[in-house]
Image (cartoon, rainbow, N blue to C red):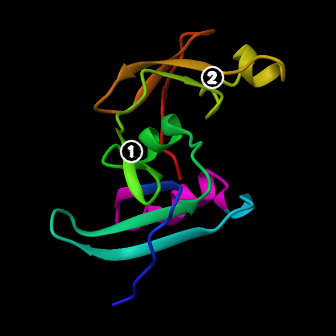
Amino acid sequence: MIEVASIRRGLVVDHITAGKGLLIFNKLNMASLNCPVVLLMNVPSQRMGRKDIIKVENFTEIDTAMLGLIDTKVTVNIIENEHVVEKIKLAIPHEVKGLFPCGNPRCVTNIDAYVTPTFHLHDEANCSYTCEYCEEITKVEIR
């Protein structure tokens, strides 16, 4: 089994559904970080069977809204002095700004670059959001 050393300070994105780690890595643009990042895929897990894990050293800022849209099972652990000081359990966000476009091609957010698309949760089960500007319902599928 591969062993990855613990980190002194940073964050661990844990309990990622197996196969979604690379998607999270890419969507959060982790390759551009100027610090060590480890992506572990298909790690054995008693609770999940298999899971992915991302460890980031010397970095604690992460977009929890984007993470919640991709996988609500994710837990973000903030690490200080090799110990977990905070655990963040994710849920689907109730408000989202600028993470995806409105489904209405005539919406002002798709025409005017200065307007940030803002959405409010419409249906949690279907992961659909209502646009704040045109009230179009948009189903979100992050790929």
Q: Is residue 112 above or below residue 15?
A: above
The residue at which mark 2 appears reads as: 104
Judge from the rendering whether residue 110 lies leftward or rightward of residue 78; answer left or right. right
**Which residue is more in the foreground, 127 or 16?**
16
Q: Name the spot of residue 63 as percent of width and height, x first.
A: 56, 39
The residue at 41%/65% (across/down) is 53
The residue at which mark 1 appears reads as: 85
Q: Is residue 55 above or below residue 71?
A: below
What's the residue type where badge 2 is placed?
Asn
Magenta residues, start to end: 14-30
Residue 99 placement: quadrant: top right
Q: CA distance from mark 2 to mark 1?
A: 42 Å
What's the residue type where badge 1 is placed?
Val
**Which residue is more in the foreground, 24 or 46?**
46
User: Element at badge 1?
Assistant: strand
Check whether the beta carbons of the residues at disc 2 and disc 1 lie within 8 A of each other.
Answer: no
Residue 88 placement: quadrant: top left
Which quadrant is home to the N terminus? bottom left
User: Element at badge 2?
Assistant: loop
Q: Which mark is residue 1?
A: none
The residue at 49%/38% (across/down) is 64
